[in-house]
Image: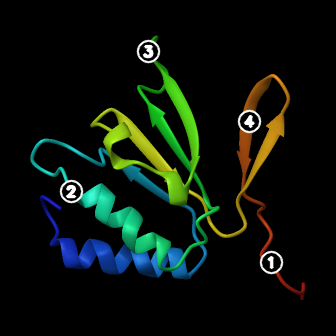
Amino acid sequence: DNLKPWELIELRLLAAAGAGFVIALYNPISKARPWQLGRAFECLTAILPGTTPVVFGRAAGRPDERIEVFLLADADAEKADMATCIIIGSPETRIIKRGEKPALVYTPRSAAGPRR
């Protein structure tokens, strides 16, 4: 919220979640912005199920890359830093377990409900 007021960011988060979009948050937390990510998770739990997948991707493409998948109800803002990209699924997003391999997170392209 360095360039936009927090109220606008919160409104947009709620609108995106309410519309069923997957949401990506880049540079989600810093020393200057320590509380906003936790508040974002609180806001989103008012609209999205606690079982919504949330991916924390830290240092993607670098030797110290770390990808972790949580449920929204368990997402902890303190696990993020400026090198983290957070992807919050839609109500349609699923975690696909693959035995010993890392789980996949998948959101179908088609909309839920009857087709036209």
Which residue: 29% across, 37% down? 81
Helix, strand or loop at label 2? It is loop
Please determine whether, in this image, residue 28 is positioned above or below residue 57.
Answer: below
x and y percentages locating residue 12 in the rendered image: 36, 76
The one of 115 and 112 positioned closer to us in this rendering = 112
Amino acid type, residue under disc 4 in the picture: Ala
Q: Which residue is mark 4?
A: 103
Q: Residue at x 89, y 88 (%)?
A: 116
* Depth check, front residue: 75 or 21: 75
Badge 1 marks a residue whose secondary structure is: loop
The local crowd at label 3, few if under 14, some if 14 to 19, many if 20 or more residues have their Cα within 10 Å, is few
- Residue underneath mark 3: 64
Q: Residues within 10 Å of mark 1 (few under 14, many from 20)?
A: few
Q: Amino acid at mark 2?
A: Trp
Q: Quadrant of residue 3?
A: bottom left
Q: Which residue is mark 1?
A: 112
Q: CA distance from mark 3 to mark 2?
A: 25 Å
Q: Earlier in the sequence, mark 3 or mark 2?
A: 2
Mark 3 residue type: Asp
Taking the image as shown, residue 25 lies to the left or right of residue 87, namely: left
Q: Which mark is residue 77?
A: none
Residue name at image x 33 percent, y 81 percent:
11
Q: Earlier in the sequence, mark 1 or mark 4?
A: 4
Tag 4 secondary structure: strand
Marks 1,4: beta carbons within 8 A? no
**Distance from label 1 to label 4 (Cα)?**
23 Å
Q: Nearer the viewer, mark 4 or mark 3?
A: 4
Question: Looking at the picture, does residue 33 appear above or below residue 80?
Answer: below
Position of residue 38 relative to residue 19, above or below, is: above
Residue beneath disc 2:
35
Please state which of the two labelled residues, at mark 1 or mark 4, is closer to the viewer: 4
